[in-house]
Image (cartoon, rainbow, N blue to C red):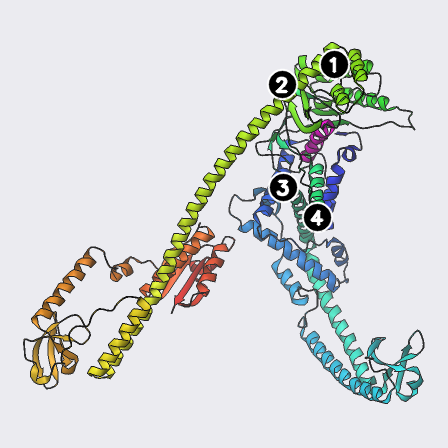
C-alpha cells in the first residue's frame, strides 16, 4: 500500500511515469505504463527486474534489436473479425511491419547464445507469427506502404494500361496547351491541373469560348476558367474507367487478404500483447540507461543497503541543465542502510542542507524498485521488499475539513501508528514542527517511540534535539547528519550516518552579520549546554572536512600513479601491435617482391633462349637483370663468372663436365651424337642440345660442389623455408569459432597469405552463425583480396552459412 492516495505526485514518481510513456514507441507500451502497480511479492518483482536488466544490457551492448514499427493493430483486428469486411492498405502496412518486428524479436532471442536473456526469452514462449501470412502481406504491400504493381496479374495489366493512357493524355494536352499559350488564351506560366479527377487547362475567362470543351470550375476571382478540352474527353473517360477497375481489383485483393488474415487473429492478439510488453520493457530499460541504473541484490525481507544512490529526478534535471547551459553540477550520491539493527534513521542538519532530498530519495527509489524499475545506485547495493510506504511531507492543511498544518500531520501520524507494521517503510519530513516546540518535540518523541515498538522501518528529518538524543540512546534508531561547511556556510549535501547534525543557527546568524549583542543574547537564552553541544558538532565537522581533504589528496596521487601505469601498459601494447603490423606488411612486401623477381628472372631466361645463347643477347639480358636487382632489391648483383665459349660439337667428349646454361648443377657427358649430347645429371640421363651446354673446369666444379654442400647444410639447420614440409603441415581449414573480431581478422590475413604462397586451390573458415560478426569480417577481407577468386557458403549438410569457402586464383 502507498499512503497517501496522491503518493506518486508527492514523491515524484508521476514524473517518471511520464518519462516512461515518452520512451514507449506505441500505445501498446503506454498502456502497460499506465497499469504499473506497486509490487509486494518477491518472485513477481524479481521477474520484472530481471527483464528490465536484460534489456538494459541489450541496449548498452549496441545489439541490433528491432526498434521500429511497434504499431498497435488491435483496432484493425476488430474490423478484420467481421465477415465480409476488409482492411485498407495502410492497415495492412502496419500489420505487416509490426508482424515483422515481432518475428525479428523472436528470432533475436532464439539465436542468442544459450544462457543469454533467459527472462526475455521466456516471454516469447507460445508466440507465433505465421511466415506464410507475412509473405502474403508482403506480396501485396511493399515496405513503403504502397500496393505492389504485381499484386495480381489483372492489377498489373490495369496499371500498365493506366500509365499508357495517362502518358497519351499528357502528350495530347501538352500540344493543346502550347497552341493556347501561343494564341494568348492561357497565361504563359500556367500548367494543366486536376478538377474532379480529370486533367483540365486554366483558360483566361474572356477566351473560354475559344477552347472547345467542358467547363469544370473557375477561380475565386472569376478570371480563370478550368476547361477540359473536347479532344481529351475519351482519354479522360478511359482513365476514369481504368481507375475504377483498378480500385475494384484492389478491393478484391484486400478482401481475399483479410479472409486469409482472419483465422490467425487469436495468435496475432497474443503476439501483439508480446509486442506491447517488449515496448514497455524497452522503455524501462531506456530510462535505466539514461539514469545509469543498476539491479541491486533483491531480498524477500525489508532491507535498504544502497551504495551511491542518487535522486533520479534531480539527475534528470541536472542533465537537462548541462545540455542547455553547460552546468557541471552533479547529484551527490548517498550511502544508506536500514536493517533490523538500525531500522529508523533520524536525519538532522541545517536548513537547505539536503535532509528532505535524502528522505525523498529513499521514498522515490524504493517506489521505483517495487514498480519493477532498476534504481540509480552503485554496484554492491542490496534492497528488500516492503508491504507499505507511508509518507508525510509538505503542507497538508485543508480549508474544507478545517485542518491546520499541524493537525494534518497528527492525522497522518495516527494512520501510521494504526496501519504501519514490521514490513512498512515510514517517511516523515520535519517531524514535530507546526506547533509549540517543546510540545511538538514531546509528541514527536512519543510517536517515534510507538513506531519503533511496532518495528517499522523509516527515515525522519528533524531539528529537535530531544529526537536526536532519543535516537542516540534507543536501540533500533540511528542518527544521521547532513554534512555542512561551517567556514563557508555551505551545505555539502552528503549524508553521514552515526552522528546527529547541528542546525548551525547561532553560527549562521553570526556569519551573516546580526548585531553581536543580539547573537550573544540568543546564546544566553539557548543555554550553555546547547551552545557547547553545537560547538562540539562544529568542531567535529571541521576535523572531518580536513581529514577528507587529506584523503582526497592521497587518492589524487594514487590516481596519478595508476594513470602512469596504464599509460605504460598502453604504450607497451601499442608497440606490440605496431610490431605485428610491421611484420605483416614486410611479409606482404617480400611476397610481392618475390613474385616480381621470379617474373623478371623468367623473362631474362626467355630472352636468352630466344636469342639462342648469343653473347650480345646474353649480355643485354644480364645487364637488365642486374639493373632490376639494384633498383628493386637494393643490393649489388653477384659478379659474373668469367665468360666461356659455348660448348661446340667437336669440343665435347664422353666424361666431360658440363652444365646447362644459367643453372648451378652440373653433370657428365655420356655420349655426343651430332648436335645432341647425352648427359647424366645425378641419377637422371637426358638428351640436351649441345648449344645449351657449357663446359666446366675442375676449379668451377669444386666451387659448385662447395656451394651445394653449404646450401644443404643451411636447409638442414632450418635456415631456409622447406616448402615441401610447409605444404605437408598446412591445413586448408581455419577454425575461428569463439574468437573476437580483431583476433579473427589477424588470423585470417596470415592464413590467406600462407595459402597463396603454398598455392592452395581452396580454403575454408569455420566461424559459426551467432550474430554474423565473424562471418562478415572474414568475407569482407576475402572479397578485398585479388588472390581470391570467389567466396561462398559451405553445403548445408556441412555447415551452411556457418562455414565460408574461398577459391584462390
Asked whether the beta carbons under mark 3 and mark 2 sit within 8 Å of each other, the answer is no
| Residue identifier under label 1 | 466
For the residues bearing labels 4 and 3, Cβ distance under 8 angstroms: no
Q: Residue 747 at x, y = what percent?
A: 40, 55
Q: Main secondary structure of the magenta part?
A: helix
- Secondary element under disc 2, as helix, strand or loop, is loop
Q: Position of residue 364 (x, y in %)?
A: 71, 33
Quadrant assignment for the N terminus: top right
Give whichever of discs 4 and 3 has the lower sequence position. Answer: 4
Give the CA distance from mark 1 to mark 4.
50 Å
To which residue does mark 3 refer?
52
Q: Magenta stretch containing residue 96, yes or no?
A: no
Query: Residue 661's image quarter?
Result: bottom left
Mark toward the start of the polypeptide (4 vs 2): 4
Badge 1 or badge 4: first in the primary sequence? 4
Disc ID at residue 24? 4
- Extreme-top residue of the structure: 528
- Mark 3 nearby-residue class (10 Å; few <14, some 14–19, many ≥20): many
* Residue 79 horizontal side relative to residue 640, left or right: right
* Label 2 or label 1, whichever comes before in sequence order: 2
**CA–CA distance in space, label 3 to label 2:** 32 Å
Residue 611 is left or right of residue 303, and the answer is left
Q: Where does the magenta region start and end? A: 354-369
| The disc label shown at residue 341, or none | 2
**Mark 2 to mark 1 CA distance (whole Å):** 21 Å
x 70%, y 47%: residue = 23
Q: Quadrant of residue 183?
A: bottom right
Mark 3 residue element: helix
How packed mark 2 is, by other alpha carbons closer than 10 Å (few <14, some 14-19, many 20 or more), is few
For the residues bearing labels 1 and 3, Cβ distance under 8 angstroms: no
Residue 96, position as x, y percentages in the image: 67, 60
Amino acid at each position: 500500500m502507498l499512503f497517501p492516495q496522491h503518493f506518486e505526485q508527492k514523491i515524484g514518481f508521476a514524473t517518471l511515469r511520464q518519462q516512461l510513456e515518452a520512451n514507449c514507441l506505441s500505445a501498446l507500451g503506454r498502456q502497460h505504463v499506465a497499469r504499473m502497480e506497486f509490487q509486494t511479492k518477491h518472485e513477481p518483482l524479481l521477474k520484472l527486474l530481471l527483464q528490465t536488466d536484460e534489456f538494459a544490457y541489450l541496449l548498452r551492448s549496441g545489439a541490433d534489436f528491432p526498434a521500429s514499427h511497434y504499431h498497435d493493430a488491435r483496432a484493425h483486428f476488430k474490423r478484420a473479425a467481421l465477415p465480409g469486411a476488409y482492411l485498407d492498405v495502410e492497415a495492412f502496412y502496419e500489420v505487416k511491419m509490426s508482424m515483422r518486428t515481432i518475428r525479428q524479436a523472436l528470432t533475436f532471442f532464439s539465436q542468442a547464445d544459450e544462457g543469454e536473456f533467459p527472462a526475455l526469452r521466456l516471454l516469447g514462449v507460445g508466440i507465433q507469427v505465421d511466415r506464410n501470412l507475412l509473405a502474403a502481406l508482403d506480396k501485396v504491400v511493399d515496405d513503403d506502404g504502397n500496393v505492389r504493381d504485381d499484386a495480381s496479374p489483372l492489377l498489373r495489366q490495369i496499371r500498365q494500361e493506366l500509365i499508357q493512357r495517362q502518358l497519351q493524355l499528357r502528350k495530347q494536352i501538352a500540344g493543346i496547351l502550347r497552341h493556347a499559350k501561343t494564341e494568348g488564351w492561357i497565361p504563359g506560366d500556367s500548367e494543366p491541373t486536376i478538377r474532379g479527377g480529370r486533367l483540365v487547362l486554366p483558360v483566361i475567362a474572356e477566351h473560354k469560348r475559344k477552347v472547345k470543351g467542358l467547363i469544370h470550375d473557375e477561380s475565386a476571382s472569376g478570371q480563370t476558367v478550368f476547361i477540359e478540352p473536347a479532344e481529351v474527353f475519351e482519354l479522360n473517360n478511359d482513365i476514369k474507367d481504368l481507375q475504377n477497375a483498378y480500385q475494384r481489383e484492389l478491393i478484391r485483393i484486400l478482401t481475399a487478404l483479410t479472409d486469409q488474415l482472419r483465422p490467425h487473429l487469436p495468435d496475432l492478439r497474443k503476439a501483439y500483447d508480446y509486442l506491447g510488453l517488449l515496448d514497455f520493457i524497452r522503455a524501462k530499460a531506456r530510462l535505466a540507461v539514461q539514469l545509469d541504473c543498476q539491479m541491486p541484490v533483491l531480498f524477500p525481507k525489508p532491507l535498504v543497503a544502497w551504495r551511491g544512490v542518487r535522486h533520479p529526478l534531480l539527475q534528470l534535471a541536472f542533465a537537462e541543465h548541462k545540455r542547455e547551459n553547460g552546468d557541471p553540477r552533479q547529484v551527490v550520491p548517498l550511502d544508506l542502510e536500514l536493517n533490523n539493527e538500525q531500522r529508523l534513521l533520524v536525519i538532522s542538519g541545517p536548513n537547505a542542507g539536503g535532509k528532505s532530498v535524502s528522505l525523498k530519495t529513499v521514498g522515490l527509489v524504493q517506489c521505483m524498485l517495487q514498480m519493477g524499475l532498476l534504481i540509480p545506485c552503485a554496484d554492491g547495493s542490496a534492497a528488500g521488499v516492503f508491504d507499505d510506504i507511508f509518507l508525510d511531507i509538505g503542507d497538508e492543511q485543508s480549508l474544507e475539513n478545517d485542518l491546520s498544518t499541524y493537525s494534518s500531520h497528527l492525522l497522518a501520524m495516527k494512520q501510521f501508528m494504526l496501519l504501519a507494521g514490521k514490513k512498512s517503510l515510514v517517511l516523515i519530513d520535519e517531524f514535530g514542527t507546526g506547533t509549540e516546540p517543546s510540545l511538538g518535540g514531546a509528541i514527536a518523541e512519543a510517536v517515534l517511540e510507538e513506531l519503533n515498538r511496532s518495528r517499522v522501518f523509516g527515515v525522519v528529518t528533524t531539528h529537535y534535539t530531544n529526537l536526536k538524543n532519543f535516537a542516540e540512546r534507543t536501540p533500533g534508531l540511528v542518527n544521521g547528519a547532513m554534512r555542512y561547511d561551517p567556514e563557508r556556510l555551505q551545505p555539502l549535501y552528503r549524508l553521514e550516518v552515526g552522528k546527529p547534525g547541528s542546525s548551525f543557527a547561532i553560527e549562521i546568524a553570526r556569519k551573516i552579520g546580526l548585531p553581536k549583542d543580539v547573537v550573544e543574547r540568543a546564546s544566553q537564552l539557548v543555554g550553555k549546554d546547547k551552545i557547547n553541544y553545537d560547538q562540539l558538532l562544529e568542531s567535529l565537522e571541521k576535523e572531518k572536512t580536513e581529514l577528507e581533504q587529506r584523503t582526497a589528496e592521497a587518492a589524487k596521487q594514487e590516481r596519478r600513479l595508476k594513470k602512469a601505469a596504464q599509460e605504460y601498459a598502453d604504450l607497451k601494447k601499442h608497440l606490440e601491435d605496431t610490431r605485428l603490423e610491421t611484420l605483416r606488411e614486410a611479409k606482404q612486401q617480400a611476397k610481392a617482391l618475390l613474385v616480381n623477381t621470379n617474373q623478371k628472372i623468367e623473362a631474362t631466361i626467355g630472352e636468352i633462349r630466344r636469342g639462342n645463347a648469343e653473347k650480345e643477347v646474353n649480355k643485354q639480358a644480364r645487364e637488365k637483370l642486374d639493373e632490376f636487382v639494384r633498383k628493386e632489391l637494393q643490393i649489388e648483383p653477384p659478379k659474373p663468372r668469367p665468360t666461356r665459349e659455348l660448348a661446340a660439337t667437336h669440343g665435347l667428349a664422353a666424361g666431360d663436365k658440363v652444365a646447362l646454361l644459367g643453372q648451378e648443377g652440373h653433370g657428365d657427358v655420356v655420349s655426343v651424337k651430332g648436335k645432341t649430347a647425352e648427359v647424366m645429371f645425378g641419377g637422371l640421363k637426358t638428351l640436351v642440345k649441345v648449344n645449351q651446354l657449357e663446359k666446366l673446369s675442375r676449379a668451377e666444379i669444386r666451387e659448385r660442389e662447395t656451394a651445394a654442400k653449404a646450401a644443404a647444410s643451411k636447409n638442414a639447420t632450418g635456415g631456409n623455408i622447406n616448402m615441401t614440409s610447409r605444404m605437408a603441415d598446412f591445413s586448408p581449414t581455419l577454425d575461428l569459432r569463439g574468437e573476437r573480431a580483431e583476433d579473427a581478422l589477424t588470423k585470417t590475413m596470415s592464413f590467406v597469405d600462407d595459402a597463396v604462397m603454398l598455392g592452395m586451390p581452396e580454403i575454408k573458415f569455420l566461424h559459426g552463425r551467432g550474430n554474423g560478426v565473424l562471418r562478415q569480417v572474414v568475407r569482407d577481407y576475402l572479397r578485398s583480396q585479388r588472390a581470391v577468386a570467389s567466396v561462398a557458403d559451405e553445403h548445408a549438410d556441412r555447415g551452411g552459412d556457418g562455414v565460408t569457402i574461398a577459391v584462390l586464383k
